[in-house]
Image (tube, helix red, strand yellow):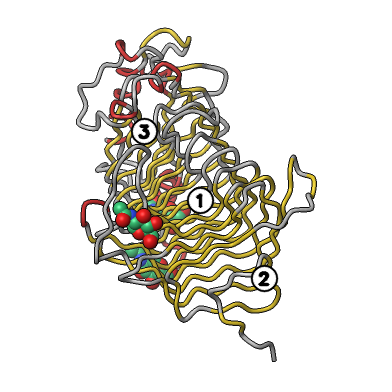
Amino acid sequence: MLFSISFFQWVLFVQSMEPFVYDVNLAGAIGDGESDDTEAFKNAWNVVCSSHISSGIFRVPYGQKFLLQPLTFNGECRPKNITFQIDGILIAPSDPSSWKCKETNCNNWITFQHFDGLIIQGTGSLHGQGQKWWQMGCMHNKVSFAILDSKNVHISGLTSVDSRKWHISIERSSSVHASKLNIKAPKDSPNTDGIRIQHSTNVTIASSIIKTGDDCIGIGDGSKYININRIFCGPGHGISIGSLGENGRRETVEYVTVRRANFYATENGLKIKTWQGGHGYARYIRFEHISFSKVIRPIIIDQYTCPLHQHCKNYSTAVEISNILYNDLRGTTNGEIAVELSCSKSVPCKNIRMKDIQLDYGINGKMYDGHPKSHCLNVVQSWDEGYVYPNVPCLTKKLSY
Ligand SMILES: *[C@@H]1O[C@H](CO)[C@@H](O)[C@H](O)[C@H]1NC(C)=O
Ligand SMILES: *[C@@H]1O[C@H](CO)[C@@H](O)[C@H](O)[C@H]1NC(C)=O
Ligand SMILES: *[C@@H]1O[C@H](CO)[C@@H](O)[C@H](O)[C@H]1NC(C)=O
């Protein structure tokens, strides 16, 4: 009967709806920016993770700075939904010699793994303090925030500053939504990608500002159903797919959509890069409603990836690039070649479509009376529609009707 539940049952029911909230200060975190709060964070996590209530909140309060060594949060917990409410500042040790890693995830600063139902939100920030690490070469560098082997993850609101390597890495995960992030590092800082996605499915990145020294967003092997929406990128190396197929590997990326992105003073805009000799594919990729300002190479497909000062051979196999749409792209470039489609001889790019493109030559934001160029190599069965400037000669004009 509907009204037969007792008052006590009702109280228990209401209580079970309330999440369990635990503040890191309760576990002894000092938050003065100098004391090592790693143990306190681990203890606080153990309390939240073993709570009997179905959802838990791990709280990092506003107004304090917490110095943290590498730390892993493992989501194999009793509560199903976990929220990290981060309103304070997290800082990594600035000196590489004071980095203590006893964890398994030594390549990352803060790792979240094996979660199903994770929210990371707040007004707080992560300070990777990468300055001294950047000089050491990227082999030693660490990712600030890594989301590994997880699903149903929402990240929003946070700021990430000066990561040693990538700011945020999403790996072997699915259904991940990241939004309202603010990511920054100097434009000459090496390898400081904003967000790097690999081996992941159904990832959305929206409404974020990314200013870094490397790719704003990098989409690597095994990425599928990736949606990128309303991103401001620059400085940085643009939004990149790849590099795929290094050392003959079979690597794949498909169903990627980038919409409403703004590129300002970036090296590249929309880039797809692969190595010679690889296998696999990059396909079903749409770039739409995008603006560029002071971008050196707005549109680029490069199937001849080769690091500076290395000698790379050409091979008879390549990652296949097909079904790529560029629609409604506008703005200025200060490079000479606005559109570069450099595809493999053995496996040409196929089904590339460009519609309504206008890229003018500009210097310091001012339109300049030069003509940007385009360059094509090994592109087949591809066409343009509407207005495309500069003209891309390897595309067949599709008649409007
Ligand atoms: C977790 O959160 C989701 C969405 O907020 C909700 O639908 C689900 O019931 C929650 N699960 C538990 C076990 O509380
Ligand atoms: C990804 O999203 C699609 C469409 O919403 C859904 O059918 C699919 O099951 C999702 N895959 C994963 C791994 O979450
Ligand atoms: C590989 O092919 C590209 C495009 O034709 C060419 O520019 C490059 O010089 C070649 N590299 C070698 C090592 O032959």
The residue labelled by disc 3 is 143
Res. 9 in view: no
Q: Which residue is rendered at x = 59% and y = 70% of the image?
A: 392
How many numbered discs, if any? 3
Whole-percent x, y for residue 300 in the image = 51, 57
Q: Please give the label number shown on residue 239.
A: 1
294 w.r.t. 68: above or below: below
Query: Where the C terminus falls, by quadrant?
Result: bottom right
Q: Quadrant of residue 101?
A: top left
Q: Are marks 3 and 2 in contact (CB under 8 Å)?
A: no
The local secondary structure at tag 1 comes to strand
The amino acid beneath tag 2 is Val
For residue 318, which numbered disc appears in the image?
Answer: none
**Residue depicted at x 70% and y 63%:** 358
Give me the C-alpha separation between circle 2 and circle 1. Answer: 21 Å
Identify the secondary structure beneath mark 2.
strand
